[in-house]
C-alpha cells in the first residue's frame, strides 16, 4: 500500500495510541489531533487523504469537523452512541462510513481499505446540507439503534440526496411509509409534495385513475377532470405502497410513466409530463412474484435501483426499549397526561413477544395501555399482550444460557474433559427434582425418568444424592 496520510482525531489517549499503532503498522503516515479545532486545522491545511473522527471531542465535534472537510477527504466517524440521528447526520454530511465503539480493528481495517480504494470516487460526492424542515420534525423520526437499523440509516443518508428510485422491503407495520418520508425530507425535493398511494387499498378498476387521473366523461361518474397522484406529486416524491398488488396491465403503464416521465390520464389524448421521484414499498417477495408471472421483471429492474430492507421488530429486540420510551414520551405530549414508564416485567415480556404487527402493533399496545391504565408504571397486565404469541424459552435455551459462560471460562483456561465435567451437573438436579416430586419413590421416579430402578440407584450413589434432604 502506498504511503497515505491519515488524520486520527480522538481525545481518548489510550484509544488514540492503539489507532496510531494500527495505522502505522498498515503503512500509513499518521497525524493526530486531540480536539476538534486541531482536527479542523489539519484538514484545512489539506495534508491528510483520509480522516478518522470521534463525534464527541473538545471544541468542534466530529460532525462539525466533517462539515468543514467537505467531500474531498473520506471520513470515518467513530462514536460510542449509535443513534439514528448521528448515523443519518454523518452519512448526510458525506462520511464514508460510521463505526460504533467498541469496535474490532479488523472491521476498521476493512473499512479503511475500502476508503483508500474509493478515494477518487468519494471526492466526487457533494456535501449534503441539512435540509430537514420543521414541518417534518415530528413526522420523520425513525427510532432505532440496532445494527440492522444503523445500516438502514446509513443507506438513507447516501441515497436521499440522489434522484434514484428506491425499493423498500419490510413486513406490514415496520414503518415503510415513515422511512419513505425520511428519504423525501432529506432530499433536494423536501419542499415539494410527498404523495403516497396504497395499491392494496384501492380497488383495481379504480387504480389507474388514482395514479394518472382522468378526463371529464372518461367513465360513468367522471363528472369532471381530476388529477392523479403522479400530478399531485409534481417536483416531489411519489410512494407506491404495496406495489406488488398492482395488476399486470397497470404495471405496464406504470413502467412507461417511470421510463418516459409522462403518462395519459384515463380518457385523455395528450401526454402529461411529470418530474417525480419514485419510492416503492412492498411486503412481498417480488422476485418470487416475477417467477410466478404476477409481477413484471422489467418493472422490478426499474424499481430496484436501491433496495432498503427494514428488519421486523422480532429481529431487533434491542430497539424495543428505545421505541417504547419514544412512544410513551410522544403520548405524554399528545394526550396531556403524565409520563408513563414500563416495569421491568413489562419490558421483559415485550422483549419475549414476537410482534407480528411490528412497530405499529407496539405503538397501538402502548397507546391503549396509556389510555386505560391509571398507573404511572405499566405492568404486563396493562399491556395485555396476546398470550399465544409470547415466546417461551425451551429447556435447551435455558441450559444453553447457563452453559455458554461456563464453557467460555473453561476453554480459556485450556481445561478439557468438558463432557465428564458437565454431565453430572446436568443429571444431578434432574434426578433430585424427580425424586422430590415423587417423595423419594424410586420406582415412580425411575418410570418418570425412563430408566430402570437399578440405574437410578447407581446414579443416586455416583452423584452423592442424599435422599433425606429431599423430604419436605
Image (spheres, rainbow, N blue to C red):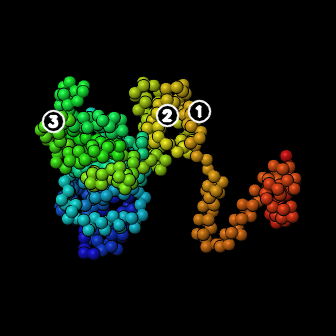
- In the rendered view, would you say 110 is above or below 336? below
- Which residue sits furthest left? 270
- Residue name at image x 20 percent, y 35 percent: 266
Up/down of 122 relative to 325, above or below: below
Along the line of sight, which residue is nearer the eye, 392 or 472? 392
Q: Quadrant of the N terminus?
A: bottom left
Residue that mark 2 sits on = 365
Q: Secondary structure at mark 2?
A: helix
Residue at 39%, 46% in the rendered image: 283
Q: Secondary structure at mark 3?
A: loop
Density class for disc 1 (Cα within 10 Å; few <14, some 14-19, many ≥20) is: few
Q: Which residue is mark 1?
A: 381
Q: Is residue 115 visible?
A: yes
Callout 3 crowding tier (Cα within 10 Å): few <14, some 14–19, many ≥20 = some
Instruction: Indicate the quadrant where residue 267 lies.
Output: top left
| Closest to the observer, 191 or 163 | 163
Residue 268: mark in rendering: 3
Query: In the drawing, what numbered circle is on residue 364?
Result: none
* Nearest the eye: 215 or 447: 215
**Would you say the residues marked 2 and 1 are in contact, meaning their CB atoms lie under 8 Å apart?**
no
Q: Quadrant of residue 337?
A: top left
Depicted 379 relative to depicted 107: above or below: above
Sequence-wise first label, 3 or 2: 3
What is the C-alpha distance between the residues marked 2 and 1? 12 Å
Is label 3 or label 2 in front?
A: 3
Residue drawn at (14%, 39%), measured in percent from left and top?
272
Left or right relative to 233: residue 283: right
Amino acid at each position: 500500500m502506498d504511503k497515505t496520510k491519515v488524520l486520527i482525531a480522538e481525545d481518548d489517549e489510550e484509544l488514540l495510541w492503539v489507532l496510531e499503532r494500527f495505522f502505522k503498522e498498515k503503512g500509513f503516515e499518521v497525524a493526530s489531533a486531540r480536539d476538534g479545532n486541531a482536527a479542523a486545522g489539519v484538514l484545512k491545511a489539506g495534508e491528510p487523504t483520509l480522516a478518522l473522527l470521534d463525534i464527541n471531542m473538545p471544541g468542534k465535534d466530529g460532525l462539525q469537523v466533517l462539515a468543514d472537510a467537505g467531500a474531498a477527504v473520506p471520513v470515518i466517524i467513530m462514536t460510542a452512541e449509535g443513534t439514528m440521528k448521528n448515523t443519518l447526520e454523518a452519512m448526510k454530511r458525506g462520511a464514508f462510513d460510521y463505526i460504533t465503539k467498541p469496535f474490532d480493528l479488523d472491521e476498521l481495517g476493512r473499512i479503511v481499505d475500502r476508503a483508500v480504494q474509493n478515494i477518487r470516487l468519494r471526492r466526487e460526492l457533494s456535501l449534503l446540507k441539512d435540509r430537514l424542515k420543521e414541518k417534518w420534525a415530528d413526522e420523520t423520526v425513525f427510532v432505532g439503534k440496532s445494527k440492522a437499523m444503523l445500516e438502514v440509516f446509513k443507506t438513507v443518508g447516501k441515497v436521499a440526496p440522489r434522484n434514484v428510485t428506491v425499493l423498500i422491503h419490510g413486513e406490514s407495520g415496520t414503518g415503510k411509509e415513515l422511512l419513505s418520508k425520511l428519504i423525501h425530507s432529506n432530499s433536494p425535493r423536501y419542499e415539494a409534495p410527498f404523495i403516497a398511494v396504497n395499491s392494496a387499498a384501492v380497488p383495481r378498476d379504480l387504480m389507474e385513475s388514482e395514479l394518472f387521473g382522468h378526463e371529464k366523461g372518461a367513465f360513468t361518474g367522471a363528472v369532471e377532470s381530476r388529477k392523479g397522484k403522479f400530478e399531485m406529486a409534481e417536483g416531489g416524491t411519489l410512494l407506491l405502497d404495496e406495489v406488488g398488488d398492482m395488476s399486470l396491465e397497470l404495471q405496464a403503464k406504470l413502467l412507461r410513466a417511470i421510463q418516459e416521465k409522462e403518462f395519459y390520464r384515463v380518457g385523455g389524448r395528450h401526454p402529461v409530463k411529470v418530474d417525480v421521484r419514485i419510492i416503492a414499498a412492498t411486503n412481498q417477495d417480488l422476485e418470487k412474484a416475477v417467477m410466478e408471472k404476477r409481477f413484471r421483471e422489467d418493472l422490478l429492474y426499474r424499481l430496484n435501483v436501491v433496495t432498503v430492507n427494514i428488519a421486523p421488530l422480532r429481529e431487533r429486540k434491542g430497539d424495543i426499549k428505545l421505541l417504547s420510551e419514544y412512544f410513551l414520551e410522544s403520548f405524554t405530549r399528545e394526550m396531556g397526561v403524565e409520563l408513563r414508564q414500563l416495569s421491568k416485567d413489562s419490558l421483559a415480556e415485550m422483549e419475549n413477544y414476537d410482534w407480528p404487527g411490528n412497530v405499529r402493533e407496539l405503538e397501538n399496545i402502548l397507546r391503549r395501555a396509556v389510555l386505560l391504565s391509571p398507573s404511572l408504571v405499566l405492568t404486563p397486565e396493562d399491556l395485555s399482550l396476546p398470550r399465544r404469541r409470547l415466546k417461551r424459552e425451551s429447556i435447551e435455551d435455558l441450559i444453553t444460557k447457563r452453559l455458554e459462560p461456563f464453557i467460555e471460562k473453561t476453554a480459556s483456561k485450556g481445561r478439557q474433559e468438558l463432557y465428564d465435567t458437565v454431565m453430572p451437573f446436568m443429571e444431578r438436579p434432574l434426578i433430585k427434582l424427580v425424586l422430590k416430586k415423587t417423595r423419594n419413590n424410586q420406582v415412580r421416579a425411575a418410570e418418570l425418568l425412563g430408566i430402570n430402578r437399578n440405574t437410578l440407584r447407581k446414579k443416586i450413589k455416583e452423584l452423592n444424592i442424599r435422599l433425606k434432604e429431599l423430604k419436605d
